[in-house]
Structure formats: C-alpha cells, structure tokens
Image: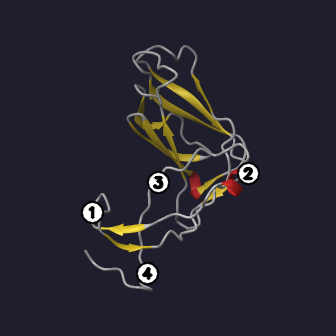
Amino acid sequence: LTQILSGQTVKFLLRLSTPSTPADLAVWQSTHERSWLLLACGDPDCQDPSASNDDLFPGFELKSSFGVATVTPEANGIAPQATVTVTLAIRPAASISSMIASGTVMVRLLAPIGFDFAVGCLAITPNPTFTSCFGFGRKAVLDARDGQLPAGHQEVYIVVTNAAMTPSAESG
C-alpha cells in the first residue's frame, strides 16, 4: 500500500449505481445532499483508509431523465424461455456526452430475475444511437455511439431470453 501525499494527483476508476432519476429534477437537486465521501483503502471493507476527501467531493449532477422507458417484446415474444427481440424505447430529456474526447457513455440495463441478455445483445446493427450491447445474464450494457446519448426518442432492439415463468411484481 502506497501512501497518497497531500497535493498528489491520483487517478482512479469509480463504478457506482446512481439513484433513479426523479420526475422533477430541480426539486430533487434542491432536497438531496450532493457531497460524497471518497476513501482510499487497501482492504475491501475499508477498515484502514489511507486517504479521504473529508466528505467534500461535490458529487455528480444528474443530467436528465430517461422519461418513460418501455420494453416491448416482438409479436408472440412472451413464451417462456424463448429467445426474442425486445424494443427498448427511452426519451432522454437532455443530451448526455462524455467529458473526455475518447470517453464513452453507457446505459446499463437490469432485467427481472430469470431473463438473460445475449452476449452480443444488439439485435439490429447498425443502430443510430448505440454501437454495441454486451449481455451478462440479467445485466446488459449499451455503448452510446461517439460518447453521446442524444436527447429525444431513442429505440434499440435487444436480444433476450425470457424467464421460465412470468416474474412476480416483486422481482427485479
């Protein structure tokens, strides 16, 4: 473990789950704390941190809502355990772009328990918005073309295998 010195520049990768985007972004931003506590640790439980930002990191601004997202199966596409194409429709309220010239913007999908995305889950290529879709069981990641997710109506066709039975309303 190497000590991080005061004023030293440190690069790091951060993966996180953001909250669901609220319907009224302005109200949410005025009622929720944005400061984050970042700790550098040598152990997974961070029992002995070597550096901290003292809870002063300003956090990330939520940029927009996806609006009402819909997933529509193909005709006769609800049979149990069938591999089908579904249409994902989103309507971002604002364009989202990578701040880094060669950066990426990705959309992560999480299907209900029992559903599985194909490894290469983009059903139709090319797609005007997404270059690829990588499936990992019930999770999938869509890579936005040129590091930008445009505002407005977007549709993408995705390959998924249906669950063996219809999921309950509580699964997710």
Residue contact at pointers 1 and 2, CB within 8 angstroms: no
Residue type at mark 4 is Thr
- With 165 as the anchor, is 57 left or right in this view? right
Q: Write down the quadrant of residue 69 in the picture.
A: top right
Q: Which residue is mark 1?
A: 43
The residue carrying pointer 1 sits among few (fewer than 14), some (14 to 19) or many (20 or more) residues within 10 Å by Cα, namely few
Task: Please provide percent x and percent y for residue 23.
Answer: 71, 42
Q: Which residue is mark 4?
A: 9
Q: Earlier in the sequence, mark 4 or mark 3?
A: 4
The residue carrying pointer 3 sits among few (fewer than 14), some (14 to 19) or many (20 or more) residues within 10 Å by Cα, namely few
Find numbered disc 4 in the image and state the secondary structure of the residue it sits on: loop
Residue type at mark 3 is Leu
- With 93 as the anchor, is 7 left or right in this view? left
Q: Which residue is mark 2?
A: 27
Distance from label 1 to label 2 (Cα)? 38 Å
What residue lies at 47% left-to-right and 73% top-to-bottom? 53
Distance from label 4 to label 3 (Cα)? 22 Å
Q: Which residue is mark 3?
A: 16
Task: Please provide percent x and percent y for residue 54.
Answer: 47, 72
Q: Depth check: 53 or 116 in front?
A: 53
Residue contact at pointers 1 and 4, CB within 8 angstroms: no
* Number of the front mark, 2 or 4: 2
Q: Earlier in the sequence, mark 2 or mark 4?
A: 4
* Number of the front mark, 1 or 3: 1
Q: Earlier in the sequence, mark 1 or mark 4?
A: 4
The residue carrying pointer 4 sits among few (fewer than 14), some (14 to 19) or many (20 or more) residues within 10 Å by Cα, namely few
Against 141, is 49 above or below? below
Task: Please provide percent x and percent y for residue 98.
Answer: 58, 62
- With 44 as the anchor, is 69 left or right in this view? right
Find numbered disc 2 in the image and state the secondary structure of the residue it sits on: helix
